[in-house]
Image: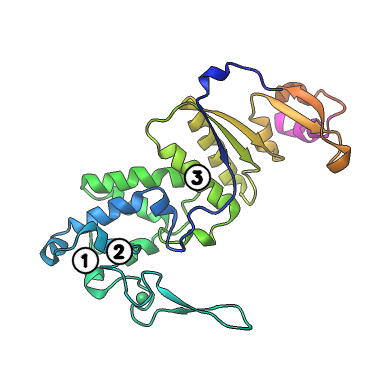
Amino acid sequence: MLRGDLDVIKDVEFIDQNPIGKSSRSNPATYLKAWDEVRKLMSDEKQAKLEGFKPAHFSFNVDGGRCDECQGEGSIKVEMQFMADLVLTCESCHGKRFKNEVLDIRHRHKNVFEILEMTIEEAINFFSESESTTAKRIVNKLKPLADVGLGYVHMGQSSSTLSGGESQRVKLASFLALEKSEPTLFIFDEPTTGLHFHDINKLLKAFNALIDKGHSIIVVEHNMEIIKSADHLIDLGPEGGNEGGYLVFEGTPEKLIKEPKSYTGKYLMPYLS
Ligand SMILES: [Zn+2]
């Protein structure tokens, strides 16, 4: 059972592993609204102003600056009757997703396509070196993605290619990016799935950042690094499947390891000593 002052919670968010965004053109940079700032930055370039380009010209979601042939996808899908669909690089833009005149616009020698090719980490470094306030806003919007261990993802990487765990962390990052939000109860289902040890630490830091903002978190998890970091544990068991589902223990990690009936306690012991 959960007890506490429920009045301090204004909202509940279940952060699942379902894909973010339905369009194959959506990516982590668009989800965090960082791409809006990139479009603005590019349209502020002198050359862009001479050409009369607006931020929309740097969007791959609307006509104008994107490649007409592939509609900004960079590739063309050929449906095959008896085989898996073929994905071919667009012959018009050669996979660069935009028209040549748009690709000619550069911010510190980089055009939109080259920016989409950067990893989140590279983009943070690149825009950190810019003087412009728009570039600083881009860095602020991208940083939460690096904070949840997604620095290796490419700016333009289609959301449809992200794993369930990666999609979940993009959603977490979007909440970290909010400047102000009502105290919320976040529920995560096995967020460490597919994460390396180093990234589990990043995830824990991201959790702590949410808690520092006044939010609360419930995590369903088997990972001992996460379990040992909880304030309060609810251990269900004693076995899995039909043999489980009973409350074995409730309390702090330090007390759980003293509970002889708990398997979790046994496995947790080395993490606490
Ligand atoms: Zn194209």
Describe the element under mark 2 as helix, strand or loop: helix
Q: Real-space Cα distance between discs 3 and 1?
A: 31 Å
Query: Quick check: 6 above or below 49?
Result: above
Q: Residues within 10 Å of mark 3 (few under 14, many from 20)?
A: many
Q: Which of 141/69 is in front? A: 69
Question: What range is drawn magenta here?
Answer: 262-273
Q: Real-space Cα distance between discs 2 and 1?
A: 8 Å
Q: Real-space Cα distance between discs 2 and 3?
A: 24 Å
Q: Is residue 51 left or right of residue 179?
A: left
* Mark sitting on residue 105: 1
Q: Amino acid at mark 1?
A: Ile
Residue at the image point whose x is 69% and y is 39% from the top: 221
Q: Amino acid at mark 3?
A: Lys
Q: Which of 101/144 is in front? A: 101
- Look at the numbered discs 2 and 1 and tell me whether their residues touch, using CB distance below 8 Å: yes
Residue extending farthest front: 81
Q: Amino acid at mark 2?
A: Val
Residue at the image point whose x is 27% and y is 50% from the top: 129
